[in-house]
Image: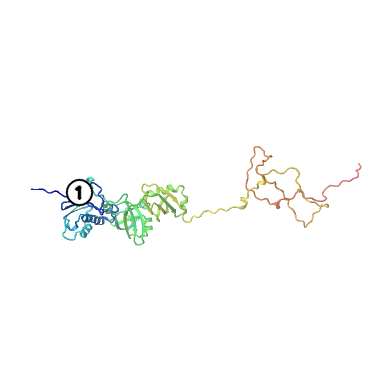
Amino acid sequence: MSTGKIIKKIICTAKCPVPIGPYSQAVLVDRTLYLSGMLGIDPKTNKLVDGGATAQARQALVNMRNVLEEAGSSCEKVVKTTILLNDMNDFGGINEVYKEFFTANYPSRTTYQVAKLPLFQFGFNMFPEIPRPFNTQYKCFSVSMLPGTYRQDVERGGKIIMPPSALEQLTRLNIIYPMLFKLTNKKTNRITHCGVLEFVADEGKVYLPYWMMHNLLLEEGELLNVESVSLPVATFSRFQPQSEDFLDITNPKAVLENGLRSFACLTTGDVIAIKYNQKIYEMCVLETRPGPAVTIIECDMNVEFAPPVGYKEPERHIKKDEEQIEDLANLMPEPLGFVPFKGEGVRLDGKKRKDWPKQEKTVTKPTYVRGIPDYDYQIGTLRFLRNMKPVNNKEIKDTDEFKAFTGEGFSLRKSKK
């Protein structure tokens, strides 16, 4: 009895993701082809495709078919398949995709939900857990409709109350924490974002703060679409107070920081409500960075304020008289000695013409020369420059006015005693 040599050939194609470990895409031994496990990874990007388990199953089967064709085989010659699922609820959609590749003479098949296997309970998982979106519709109500005592902590924050079934579904979907949601009113296409405070609402209902319902234009009992999202961490935000009363607050940034502790995220265009000193202040979110919706959980965010709605800068009235500054020439010392042409003309008969206009005395001011000291300065005195009002010359009476025949008469003859 003679034994022949076993032929072994490694199969590799660029149409399939490159192996990330010490294994081959497929190995051909004689006339039997052994394929490695395939994931829903796009060979062009080396990332899992979007669209959930159904889209990833279709990509995995496409990768498998490319390897078969590279080895000169096809899906019709496959005799055994094994499917590993993360959630057995996806079996129906994957089974429909499976029929697209195996149309007749189906191979034998085994399907497992790998998350339920014993090895996977101890952290051994060969497949990464892929987050899947949570997308459900609920009837929305304001916090005042919540059974029991009134929840002020919900009203003055940015979080909602959801039913317990939502928590169970979110746990199975393996979403990204913290739990953030996108709220959409499909009637008006209004969108906002929020966090979740508790899972104690009645089934099929969610309870929202009143300001959030007002932004979404929702009425009591209307349908609201709730979808899980992942938001970037906030780095900057700008707010505009909706009332001028906000200017009366001594430290507005501290008040805002304390109020935002009850919020999980911010959305550009929302009008949020913050309570301080038994008063509600509404703030419009004008801008957020790095995106139109951001999370503010454990973030270092810069804050700016825009002028409140209706605020006007006070007008400053400038008085011209007060703006006049004393002429520097007045600070010069008065000229000493003879000053030419300083006097007035007087008639010989001492009379003045009635039609002659009264001339005001003009005092010639010395030319101001910078740097000349005041030699009459008295030590220990200070002189302040202040706004001076012009002197009304009409109120000054001329005390040196000439009056004729006002002297006393004397006789040339000596009086006899």
- Specify whether residue 261 is in view: yes
Q: Amino acid at mark 1?
A: Leu
Q: Number of marks in the image? A: 1
Residue that label 1 marks: 117
Left or right placement of residue 122 versus residue 286 in this view = left
Q: Residues within 10 Å of mark 1 (few under 14, many from 20)?
A: few
In-front residue for pair 308/8: 8
User: Can you tell which quarter of the image residue 75 is in?
Assistant: bottom left
- Colour scheme: rainbow
Left or right placement of residue 348 versus residue 243 in this view = right
Label 1 residue SS: loop
Placement of 34 over or under 417, stated as above or below: below
In-front residue for pair 222/92: 92
In this view, which residue lies farthest toward the left?
A: 1
Q: Position of residue 84 (x, y in %)?
A: 21, 52
In this view, which residue lies farthest toward the bottom?
A: 187
Q: Position of residue 262 (x, y in %)?
A: 37, 49
- Specify whether residue 279 is in view: no
Placement of 378 over or under 287, stated as above or below: above
Q: Position of residue 271 (x, y in %)?
A: 40, 55
Q: Position of residue 402 (x, y in %)?
A: 79, 50
**Position of the C terminus by quadrant:** top right
